[in-house]
Amino acid sequence: GQQVMQIPQYQHVQEGEDFTTYCNSSTTLSNIQWYKQRPGGHPVFLIQLVKSGEVKKQKRLTFQFGEAKKNSSLHITATQTTDVGTYFCAGPLTGGGNKLTFGTGTQLKVEL
Amino acid sequence: DAEITQSPRHKITETGRQVTLACHQTWNHNNMFWYRQDLGHGLRLIHYSYGVQDTNKGEVSDGYSVSRSNTEDLPLTLESAASSQTSVYFCASSATGQGLALYEQYFGPGTRLTVT
């Protein structure tokens, strides 16, 4: 079945270091979304990418959608303690409609 | 402000009991979703609905049911709770996307369910 995998599963960084999480799908995606979940919280939407090769930036966060639309990445420059949380990518589930399949997530911890 | 709420926030129940988790949204969204979150599995879709009287099974629907009698509510029922259903449950809603893009999903605060 359709799978969306993320690596790494966990990442510990020192504050100020960069961080990247990678998302890989077993199928071509029409679009990909990214969500952030703070510890004890609920997922919150960050961004959606639709076009092949698309790059979008939100302050220190850079999101990329692969040329083949089967992979994506999220890069955080100069991490801060406010970046702590789990980052999920999500793509449309096979069969159409508005349902999503979520990646396994990357948990980011930032140490001072 | 529009919001999506879940109740209860925490629930402890015994094996074999029927349990219903409530989800209520005031976004006026047609689409509503139920997920469960377990360590190592991310978020897995249980059931979803695209409108009143519409319900569909997701990836992990066995042992769960939903009903949609109005736009605002999608209650999730565990017919006979099992220890394997101990998890954190999230409800979400979204508007309907067009073309290649989808609308973002708005998540509720979650319900932590423990089945003993």
Image: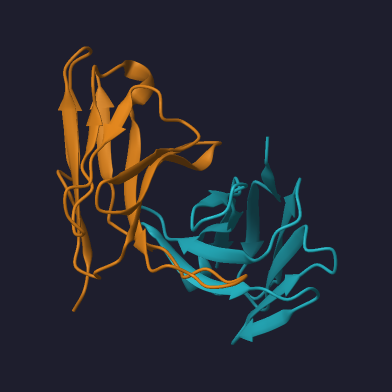
Q: Residue at x 73, y 80 (%)?
A: A55
**Residue B34 shows in the view:** no
Looking at the figure, which quarter contains the C terminus of chain B? Answer: top left
Q: Residue furthest right?
A: A67
Looking at the figure, which quarter contains the N terminus of chain B? Answer: bottom left
Q: Residue furthest front?
A: B53
**Residue A99 shows in the view:** yes
Task: For chain A, give the colour.
Answer: cyan
Q: Is residue B71 left or right of residue A88?
A: left
Q: Residue at x 27, y 55 (%)?
A: B109
Q: Which chain is orange?
A: B
Residue A12: quarter of image = bottom right
Instruction: Say if A12 sits above or below A54 in the image.
Output: above
Q: Residue at x 65, y 46 (%)?
A: A9
Position in image of residue A8 (x %, y %): 70, 49
Seen from the viewer's position, the closer of residues A40 and A91 is A91
Seen from the viewer's position, the closer of residues B60 and A107 is B60
Q: Residue furthest bottom?
A: A59
Position in image of residue A25 (x %, y %): 73, 50
Position in image of residue A79 (x %, y %): 61, 73
Q: Residue furthest top?
A: B16
Residue B17: quarter of image = top left
Seen from the viewer's position, the closer of residues A16 and A29 is A29
Position in image of residue A7 (x %, y %): 71, 50
Q: Residue at x 46, y 30 (%)?
A: B60
Q: Is residue A81 left or right of residue A8?
A: left
